Amino acid sequence: MRLNEVVFNDAKPVEGYGPGFFRIGGAVFEGAVLTGPKGSARWGGLADTAPLLGLVGEIDVIFIGTGAEIAHIPPALRNELEQAGLGVETMASPAACRTYNVLLSEGRRVALAVLPV
């Protein structure tokens, strides 16, 4: 078996999460967070679409974590992101973090917007 070191470039993997926080690239973020090729920052939640739309052209898909349980995102948000050319995958935040990390390690153009668990 051959092992290769994973290089994440400017995007950082999710290293952990817990009640109300995420640890990404060694930094702790409380509340909702957006991470991807432009780095990590607090996110205003599902109503805060501007930072998500700012990723158009830099990513192919965004994973939206809806908290401890999977839930639907507002149809208007999904439509806006898809019309801008972004793939949208919605899942519970723990699953979204894991999926983001796997695809990031494969060099995929992905971002993650997650609500806390």
Image (cartoon, rainbow, N blue to C red):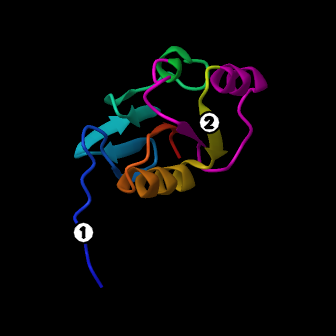
Q: Magenta part of the protein: which range?
A: 54-83
**Secondary structure of the residue carrying numbered label 2:** strand
Rate crowding at label 2 as few (under 14), some (14 to 19) or many (20 or more) other CA atoms within 10 Å: some
Asked if labels 2 and 1 touch by Cβ distance under 8 angstroms, the answer is no
**Secondary structure of the residue carrying numbered label 1:** loop
> Residue 101 appears at what percent x and percent y?
41, 54
Q: Residue at x 38, y 35 (%)?
A: 36
Q: CA distance from mark 1 to mark 2?
A: 28 Å
In the picture, the disc for residue 87 is 2
Q: Residue at x 51, y 55 (%)?
A: 99
Q: Which residue is mark 1?
A: 4
Under mark 2, the amino acid is: Gly
Residue 51 falls inside the magenta stretch = no
Q: Quadrant of residue 64?
A: top right
> Residue 32 appears at what percent x and percent y?
47, 32
> Residue 58 appears at what percent x and percent y?
43, 28
91 to the left or right of 24: right
> Residue 72 appears at what percent x and percent y?
74, 38
Q: Camera-side residue: 26 or 9?
A: 9
